[in-house]
Image (cartoon, rainbow, N blue to C red):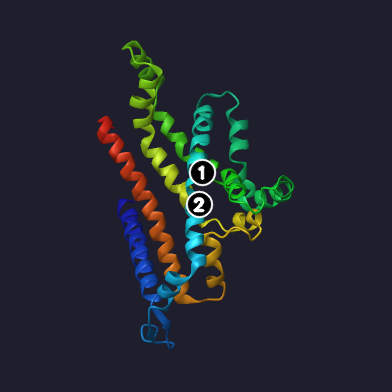
Amino acid sequence: MKAFSRIILYLFIFLIIFGGVNLFISSFQESYPWPKIIEGTYGTRAYKYIKNDNKVKIGIKNSFIIGIAATFLSVLLAYPLAKKLKTVKTKKLLSAIVFLPFVIGGTSVGFGLQQVFLKMGLAGTTFGIIFVQLAYIIPYAVWILLPGFEYISEDKIFAAKMLGAGTVDIITEIIIPTMSPFILTALSMGFILSFSQYYLTIIIGIGLVETYSTVIFPFIIVKDRALSSAMSLIFVALNLLFILIIQFILRVIKRRKRWKI
């Protein structure tokens, strides 16, 4: 079984590396004569277009604003929900409500809220897109944070109180250090979900708010391989940048607090 798992892992790593290399080469490849797919014409047209296109810059800026706001708000709201799911007696009912978007899908939620948002004046606004993405990201955040509360036992908190620790000390010295890996994962997942969201942005944004996903999608439809590949690489790079920034901030906080997890 271990040998089989190792083979699957190596295959997965190979596919990721192969896909990344192929994407990088394709971003420079303008044409390729079949079946000689390696030969063809190469150039930097895609990157020049991205550099000079103002719509791409606006899309990246809006995606970062929406992604950061929706991600942090989702994790902030998901934290008490996940904590409540651990202790509440009506756990099954609350779980069904929280994870309902998993069943009906984010696009269906968007269609259901579109008319309401139009009447409220939120359709076609950045705030409206942030708000609707909460319903899409919160279930994922709760799902990720939920296992973290298994490591926070009541005995540990009781012992801290017996030793004179206050509420703030318990939160900063026990809860946050224990939950930090789960919070980091929830933030990373939430940003990726928000950054890649297309249909909710179109439905609630009604074409008035440009994001990176709405900019890249037409090039995928028209099958502009070079531009699609270049934009996909930038998409991956921007998500990695966000994850690295969050990891760096968390590492700095840990060093200053001298947490030992």
Left or right placement of residue 118 versus residue 207 in this view? right
Mark 1 in CB contact with mark 2 (< 8 angstroms): yes
Q: Distance between the residues labelled 1 and 2?
A: 9 Å
The residue under the point 40% across, 65% down is 233
Q: Which residue is drawn at 57% across and 72% down?
A: 221
Which residue is nearer to you in this view: 157 or 173?
173
Residue at point 59%, 37% (across, down): 98
Task: Count residues near mark 2 (Cα–Cα under 10 Å), then give few for <14, some for 14-19, many for 20+.
Answer: some
Query: Tag 2: residue type?
Result: Leu
Q: Where is residue 112 in the image (x, y as percent from the top left)?
A: 71, 49
Question: Which one is in front, 244 or 205?
Answer: 205
The residue to which callout 1 is attached is 140
Count of marks overlaid on the render = 2
In the picture, the quarter occupied by the C terminus is top left
Residue 25 in sight in this render: yes
Which one is nearer the viewer's eye here, 6 or 111? 111
Whether residue 19 is situated above or below residue 154 in the rendered picture: below
Residue 259 appearing in the image: no
| Residue 31, position as x, y percentages in the image | 43, 84
- Marks 1 and 2, the one that precedes in the sequence: 1
Whether residue 120 is situated above or below residue 180 in the rendered picture:
below
Residue identified by numbered label 2: 193
User: Which three-letter amino acid code belongs to the residue tagged 1?
Assistant: Tyr
Give the residue displayed 45% in from the left and 67% down from the top.
231
* Image quadrant in which you'd find residue 209: bottom right
Residue 45 x, y percent position in the rendering: 42, 78
Q: Residue furthest bottom?
A: 33
Secondary structure under the numbered disc 1 in the rendered image: helix
